[in-house]
Image (tube, coloured by chain):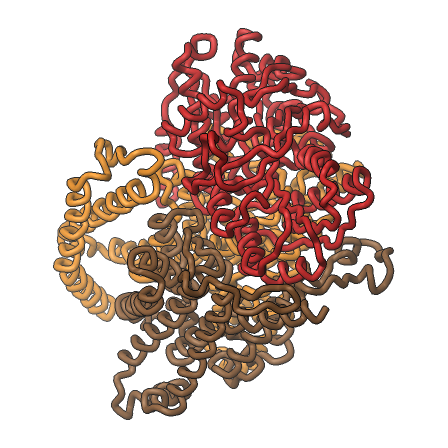
Chain colours: A red, B orange, C brown
């Protein structure tokens, strides 16, 4: 009895899934939309919705509108697979995701197996922020494309920048104890050794992910080591708390970070008062962007109320549109064939290209420092009055790294 | 003879249900969801062997689910690698044995005491294992976890288990077997002694049993079935990662068992189905689904400590005796008030969620029960809170009638059974 | 080295005292009511958020007084209208009630204050360097936290040993039935103790909020450690909770400072299958330390370090 009721409820819920409008091209956005990770996921969703509206208003793809379907994965790999399955059932054949390499690895594996087992119904996976190098190396997939520079590429760019900074003598590494933090730490060691053998690595710390409430003990250790520069891949509360503890203890070092610009990061840096001591590496800063991108950013901010945290999302959607238009088809097979090796002008300038061997995008990388806005600079972050100031550019060709990917093409 | 047939009926019905479900719900999502339900049914039942039957409140049961899954997935990869003639249906047994092994090991430490001490050790062990998953990288696969491809194992009578339908039937078969086995276990003298350990360990000792040994055995059984569930989960998703053995998963299974009802065997089954269904679908409807989960749990603790099944059983008893009509008038009075209060509460939560959490970025306009409203204006709030207050005070006012009706029914039933 | 030891000790004592501020309330509640309050860390979080809200409207100092009182009121209400109802169903139901409550409080906090950390700052009057030792500064705010924690400890001690209320509470710890028979209103004492325990946690939240980050996950981060503290110290023992708080505070802080791994002690080649374990440093294990301690203590001494009762 109760089983039958449950089944009926189930059947009802599934049939009540929103009916499809045949004409729109749907993109499944799989990221956390509830719980702790949602603050980041919602920014991503907003960005993609803005981009989809933009594409739809200007004629759409092949005359079809573009629509983003938000799917909440709760940052859980298993849940992501259910959501991806849900998307595939609704006829969504393009999915995009960014938060969490664990989710990305799960999705990439799922897409490969799904396409293998369901020929004719292929799904393509566009990754906009998961940076684990393994996704375009040992675990690469033909159906996975990545627009963010992976963590090795970022480190290559960062160390290229540090090469020209003679005042860096003693470096301390502090990272979260999981695959990404480990990758940052090992590449930092090997690349610094190669590019600046004179730099001494005075500390190499791994701390548990998102579990530390007080970084004072770690900062005491950094202080005791006499480091003048800290490199960290920390994100979320781990970067905010680390900087806070450092400011409290009066630690005077430069910070080279991956994610100081992430949601909540700028507020945290402003609080510590570390003006222009915190550097971040990204694919573009609004204040140094070309004229067109600045205009775009202003319109985006006016509409959504947040800064464009993912310039790569713009690149992703523009390249997707190009692929669809060139192939004259929205079929993932055709899209994938077009995206491979695609070259175009990047949102923040410079030529960007999708490397055919591993489906990794290469683009100019920018290093900026965070502090009070220079006169003439237009964009601050999170209403702090502080903004990013360009410190250096690394050309795309200087970030190219070899890959171990052995792509299996269908 | 007919009594035996009668006791077999539920099992036949269950088997039939397992067989026909994919015919009714054939979409891939529904299959994935029903597969997950099968896994969770085993997991929740294994949890209830501890909580409901032996009186052990564990906060770290997911450890055995996860470890079983990890061992299973490593076994699958090893089988693929060395091309052994092992096929998928055997894998859950491996997971179960792994669960059993870890259960015996950790059980030795944790089942020496019952009560709070047991709960705290289970919490500590749970944190310990989930923290070490980032340290023991080669086993737990770090953040990405360990993946596999189930279709690459040796075929089982021609089946490669590539499709979700085949996996569904595999899970259904294992689920049926496990449910039957766990039910049989409750009927054995051992199962009865577990109940005795829950009720009064001292007397158990007087009868000549060691409560400690009984607790340990129950713990091992529970860990075994949790391991089977973990392995089935690993087969279904083809990935295992550290989240599967963390505190969230442990809380989830507690929620399932409790909402369904820990006092009856069927309780956790119903709880697993309901919670899995809500977990997957509720997030499509509202962002505040976790709040609803929490409120639902508190509501169950406060008003339905016997869970959904306990509630149903209570009524079934009355219906069987033909006394349901005596309750009907009181229920008919309370039901509208209850519904009003529920609708009011949901509206208030949704309005609050919109206005507080989303208005800044997405605007305060929203759709609520099919109506377009603006959460920044006063009217929707007045209506929502008004409905809630009206409904809640209605319930408060009318509830004594339900109590009276129940008192009446119980008295009559007692008289009748006494006569 | 000396610098590292000094600051590790300072940080460890501070962290330990912070833990004790919460653990003391939790222990009191547990030993009097038999309820293991899973929502205790949530009251700590509420304290921080209330403090934040008040400080941005009136100022930090009023918040220091008002926020704990508010949290205490919330706690008393929870006891009166929630816990007391489930009391008849037994301790497991009470525990599960607080377990659900912790979820709900976290969700509500996320709804009201958002999912990102809020900008909660200490008072400008405490925004200076307390002292400078070996070229490392120690902020005045941390000294303030330490002194509040110590003051609270002293007051609590005096209250329990020197006053009539304290005597009743102490009596209720061990002989609740007897106390009730002597004519004391035990339900009201329960409500007051629960409220007071919540207020203490709230106070810890108000002063810890600006130093650590005020964010929705702060309760889940500290919650399990609190249980470790009171179980390791011995359920129902305030002295035990004090010792365990300091022990865990120092243990975790000093562990962070150490870089030893098995590889350094026994050479870089690990026995088969132990490769990962070989490279783990003690610093990496720091957050796991409390749990290792918990399991070890409970194996050797199920009553905890200073406890006399088991459940």
Residue at 44 percent across and 60 percent down: it is C209
Residue at 37 percent across and 63 percent down: it is C47
Q: Quadrant of the C terminus of chain A?
A: top right
Q: Position of residue C12 (x, y in %)?
A: 59, 70
Q: Position of residue A218 (x, y in %)?
A: 63, 59
Residue at 26 percent across and 33 percent down: it is B365
Relative placement, left or right, of C178 versus C299 is: left
Q: Give above or below for B384 relative to C197.
A: above
Q: Is residue B103 something one can see in this rendering?
A: no
Q: Quadrant of residue C125?
A: bottom left
Q: Give above or below for B241 relative to A131.
A: below
In the image shown, does A100 or B119 lie closer to the viewer? A100
Q: Is residue A177 something one can see in this rendering?
A: yes
Q: Position of residue B238 (x, y in %)?
A: 63, 38
Residue at 26 percent across and 42 percent down: it is B351
Q: Give above or below for B56 relative to A162.
A: below
Q: Quadrant of residue A392?
A: top right
Relative placement, left or right, of C263 versus B60 is: right
In the image shown, does B1 or C228 lie closer to the viewer? C228
Q: Which residue reaches farthest front?
A: A375
Q: Quadrant of the N terminus of chain A?
A: top left
Q: Position of residue C230 (x, y in %)?
A: 51, 75
């Amino acid at each position: 009895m109760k089983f039958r009721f449950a089944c009926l409820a189930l059947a009802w819920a599934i049939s009540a899934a929103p009916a499809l409008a045949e004409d729109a091209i749907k993109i499944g956005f799989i990221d956390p939309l509830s719980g702790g990770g949602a603050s980041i996921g919602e920014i991503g969703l907003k960005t993609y919705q803005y981009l989809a509206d933009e594409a739809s208003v200007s004629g759409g793809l092949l005359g079809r509108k573009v629509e983003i379907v938000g799917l909440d994965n709760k940052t859980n790999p298993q849940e992501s697979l259910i959501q991806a399955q849900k998307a595939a059932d609704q006829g969504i054949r393009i999915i995009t995701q960014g938060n969490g390499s664990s989710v990305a690895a799960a999705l990439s594996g799922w897409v490969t197996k799904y396409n293998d087992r369901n020929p004719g119904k292929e799904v393509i996976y566009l990754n906009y922020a998961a940076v684990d190098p393994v996704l375009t190396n040992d675990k690469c997939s033909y159906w996975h494309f990545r627009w963010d520079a992976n963590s090795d590429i970022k480190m290559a760019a960062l160390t290229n920048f540090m090469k020209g900074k003679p005042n860096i003598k003693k470096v301390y590494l502090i990272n979260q104890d999981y695959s990404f933090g480990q990758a940052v730490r090992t590449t930092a060691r090997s690349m610094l050794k190669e590019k600046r053998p004179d730099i001494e690595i005075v500390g190499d710390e791994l701390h548990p992910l998102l579990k530390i409430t007080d970084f004072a003990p770690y900062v005491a250790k950094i202080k005791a080591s006499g480091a003048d520069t800290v490199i960290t891949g920390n994100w979320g509360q781990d970067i905010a708390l680390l900087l806070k503890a450092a400011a409290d203890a009066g630690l005077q070092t430069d910070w080279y970070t991956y994610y100081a610009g992430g949601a909540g990061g700028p507020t945290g840096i402003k609080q510590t008062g570390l003006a222009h001591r915190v550097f971040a590496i990204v694919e573009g800063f609004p204040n140094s962007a070309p004229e067109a991108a600045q205009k775009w950013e202003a319109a985006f901010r006016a509409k959504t109320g947040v800064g464009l945290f993912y310039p790569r999302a713009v690149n992703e959607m523009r390249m997707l549109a190009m692929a669809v238009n060139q192939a004259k088809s929205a079929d993932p097979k055709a899209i994938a064939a077009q995206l491979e090796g695609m070259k175009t002008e990047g949102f923040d300038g410079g030529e960007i290209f999708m490397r055919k061997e591993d489906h990794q995008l290469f683009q100019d990388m920018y290093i900026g420092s965070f502090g009070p806005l220079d006169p003439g600079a237009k964009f601050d972050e999170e209403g702090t009055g502080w903004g990013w100031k360009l410190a250096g550019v690394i050309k795309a060709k200087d970030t190219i790294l070899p890959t171990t990917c052995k792509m299996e093409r269908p | 003879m007919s009594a035996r047939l009668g006791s077999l009926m539920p099992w036949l019905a269950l088997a039939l249900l397992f067989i026909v479900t994919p015919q009714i719900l054939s979409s891939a999502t529904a299959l994935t969801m029903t597969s997950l339900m099968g896994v969770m049914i085993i997991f929740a039942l294994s949890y209830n062997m501890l909580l409901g039957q032996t009186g052990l409140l564990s906060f770290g049961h997911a450890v055995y689910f996860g470890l079983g899954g990890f061992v299973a997935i490593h076994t699958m990869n090893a089988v693929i690698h060395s091309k052994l003639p092992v096929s998928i249906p055997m894998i859950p047994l491996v997971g179960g044995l792994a669960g059993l092994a870890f259960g015996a090991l950790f059980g030795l430490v944790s089942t020496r005491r019952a009560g709070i001490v047991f709960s705290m050790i289970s919490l500590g062990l749970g944190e310990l294992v989930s923290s070490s998953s980032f340290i023991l990288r080669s086993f737990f696969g770090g953040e990405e976890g360990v993946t596999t491809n189930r279709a690459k194992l040796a075929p089982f009578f021609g089946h490669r288990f590539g499709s979700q339908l085949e996996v569904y039937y595999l899970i259904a078969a294992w689920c049926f077997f496990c449910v039957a086995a766990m039910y049989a276990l409750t009927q054995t003298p051992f199962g009865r002694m577990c109940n005795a350990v829950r009720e009064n360990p001292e007397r158990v000792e007087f009868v000549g049993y060691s409560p400690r040994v009984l607790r340990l055995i129950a713990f091992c059984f529970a860990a075994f079935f949790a391991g089977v569930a973990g392995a089935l989960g690993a087969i279904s998703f083809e990935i295992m990662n550290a989240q599967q053995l963390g505190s969230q998963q442990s809380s989830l299974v507690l929620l399932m068992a409790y909402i369904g009802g820990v006092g009856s065997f069927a309780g956790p089954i119903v709880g697993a189905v309901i919670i899995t269904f809500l977990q997957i679908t509720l997030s499509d409807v509202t962002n505040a689904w976790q709040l609803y989960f929490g409120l639902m749990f508190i509501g169950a603790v406060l008003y339905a400590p016997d869970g959904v099944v306990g509630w149903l059983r209570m009524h079934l008893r009355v219906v069987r005796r033909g006394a349901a009509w005596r309750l009907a008038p009181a229920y008919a009075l309370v039901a509208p008030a209850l519904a009003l209060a529920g609708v009011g509460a949901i509206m208030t939560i949704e309005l609050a969620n919109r206005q507080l959490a989303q208005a800044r970025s997405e605007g305060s306009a929203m759709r609520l029960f099919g109506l377009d409203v603006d959460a920044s204006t006063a009217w929707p709030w007045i209506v929502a809170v008004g409905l809630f207050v009206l409904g809640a005070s209605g319930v408060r006012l009318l509830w004594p009638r339900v109590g009276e009706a129940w008192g009446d029914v119980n008295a009559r039933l007692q008289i009748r059974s006494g006569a | 080295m000396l610098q590292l030891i000094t600051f590790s000790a300072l940080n460890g004592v501070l962290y330990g005292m912070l833990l004790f501020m919460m653990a003391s309330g939790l222990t009191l509640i547990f030993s009097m009511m038999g309820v293991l309050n899973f929502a205790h860390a949530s009251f700590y979080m509420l304290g921080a958020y209330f403090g934040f809200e008040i400080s941005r409207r009136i100022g930090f100092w009023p918040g220091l007084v008002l926020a704990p009182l508010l949290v205490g009121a919330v706690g008393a209400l929870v006891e009166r209208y929630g816990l007391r109802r489930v009391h008849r169903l037994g301790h497991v139901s009470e525990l599960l009630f607080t377990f659900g409550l912790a979820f709900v409080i976290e969700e509500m906090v996320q709804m009201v204050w958002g999912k990102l950390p809020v900008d909660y700052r200490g008072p400008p009057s405490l925004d200076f360097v307390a002292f400078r030792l070996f070229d490392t500064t120690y902020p005045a705010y941390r000294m303030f936290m330490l002194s509040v924690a110590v003051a609270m400890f002293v007051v609590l001690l005096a209250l329990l040993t020197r006053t009539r209320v304290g005597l009743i509470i102490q009596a209720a710890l061990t002989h609740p039935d007897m106390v009730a028979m002597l004519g004391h209103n035990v339900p009201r004492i329960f409500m007051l103790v629960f409220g007071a325990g919540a207020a203490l946690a709230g106070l810890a939240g108000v002063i810890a909020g600006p130093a650590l980050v005020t964010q929705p996950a702060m309760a889940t981060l500290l919650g399990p450690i609190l249980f470790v503290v009171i179980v390791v110290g011995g359920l129902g023992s305030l002295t035990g909770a004090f010792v365990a708080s300091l022990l865990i505070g120092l243990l975790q802080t000093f562990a962070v400072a150490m870089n030893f791994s098995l590889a350094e002690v026994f050479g870089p080649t690990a026995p088969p299958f132990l490769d990962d374990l070989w490279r783990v440093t003690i610093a990496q294990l720091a957050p796991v330390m409390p749990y290792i301690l918990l399991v070890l203590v409970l194996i050797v001494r199920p009553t905890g370090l200073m406890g006399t009762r088991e459940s």
